Amino acid sequence: MDIIEKLEKNERLNYEDGVALYGLDLFTLGHFANLQRTKRWGKKVYFNINRHINPTNICKDICKFCAFSANRKNPNAYKYTKEEVLNIAKDAYARGIKEVHIVSAHNKEHDLDWYMGIFREIREKFPSLHIKAFTAAEVHFMSELHDLSYDEVLDRMIEAGVESMPGGGAEIFDEKVRAYICKGKVSSQNWLKIHELWHKRGKFSNATMLFGHIEEREDRIDHMLRLREVQDKRQGFNAFIPLVYQRDNNYLKVDKFLGSTEILKTIAISRLMLDNIPHIKAYWASATLNLAMVAQEFGADDLDGTIEKEAIQSAGGAKSAQGQALQDFLDIIITSGFTPVERDSLYNELQVYEEANSGAC
Ligand code: V47
């Protein structure tokens, strides 16, 4: 059966199909990805009102692609105090922010107790603020630092009030590429295992993929399929987030950068390959806001959120440092023909913004 026939019959796609999808033209891919997106979500596009907090950029690991961590190209090392993190959360809460997304570099001066103390205090003082925190790479780092099993670290997170896990640290699962771009970081197998253990506890998480550097198209399909296999077991991934590689201020030499077509194709293909992950996020901070708007036509149904302060993509050159003002965000979504839906961190709908109440023209 050829690939178009499989798409028309809505059959599950295998590795060879995934690679073959890249051979289709963008509009054919967009047509099929949009059918799937529309079948599930119609014209709705999800976002939340969130605040990213990155307590330190001092990291024991040296990932070649990372411009966020302090190094020779980024001499501005910082380390927040516990009070500083709590004040950011307090201020966010007072302004109606619903989620804090807390991820950090791997720094042994900020140990597990330090973070758990912060999470516990946020939980006690601001009980309606959802805590999305600790990537699988951080769980791995903490397990090595304290000689704890992954189970023990995850249980401590839950006990301290962490409600969901972000999808960072996945990068690219192919072992050869991974060894080149982020040697020493959590292995692919362990990244997947940590999320599986989290899902076993009835908890939800996200999954990212860093693309547009030295990986091949085949590696992206392999990455998606490894996630699909885990997802088949417990449906614990809420969203897949393809992160477009930002090229500035780092140690990964890449001559050829992705154009919009390849980015949109990859988003559309992820919608088609990941038939069991409900949400595909066009992360505007890495894809740019305008391309994220177009990506809504190519399978994406989620835009992350207003973010407020973005430190990782912007360190690599993205124009995302100040986040998005809510009204601007709503207006651009509505004028691009979609219905913004504010969601909570677990995708429960909080408010549907129809044109009438947005102020867009
Ligand atoms: O894991 C680092 C990536 C990730 C660069 O779960 C880079 O909802 C592009 O995971 N170019 C952290 N990307 C961000 C992340 C995330 C973001 C938004 C939402 C969620 C979620 C998760 O940023 C890292 C790494 O893959 N990253 N450097 C770079 N130069």
Image (cartoon, helix red, strand yellow):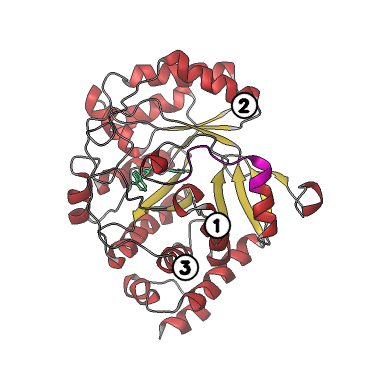
Q: Are marks 3 and 1 in contact (CB under 8 Å)?
A: no
Of the numbered discs 3 and 2, the one sitting upstream in the chain is: 2
What residue did someone put label 2 on? 128
In front of the other: 279 or 336: 336
Residue 45 in the image: state x and y as whole percent. Answer: 62, 54
Of badges 1 and 2, the one in the foreground is 1
Residue 246 in the image: state x and y as whole percent. Answer: 36, 50
**Three-letter residue code for mark 3:** Leu
Q: Residues within 10 Å of mark 2 (few under 14, many from 20)?
A: some
Q: Secondary structure at mark 1?
A: helix
- Residue for point 66% across, 46% down: 328
Q: Secondary structure at mark 3?
A: helix
Taking 213 as reference, is 344 left or right?
A: right
Q: Main secondary structure of the magenta part?
A: loop
What residue did someone put label 1 on? 290
Residue 9 lies, with reference to residue 159, above or below; the image says: below
What residue did someone put label 3 on? 272
Q: Residues within 10 Å of mark 1 (few under 14, many from 20)?
A: few
Quadrant of the frame with the C terminus: bottom right
Question: What's drawn in magenta, residue-wise?
Answer: 318-329
Q: Are marks 3 and 2 in contact (CB under 8 Å)?
A: no
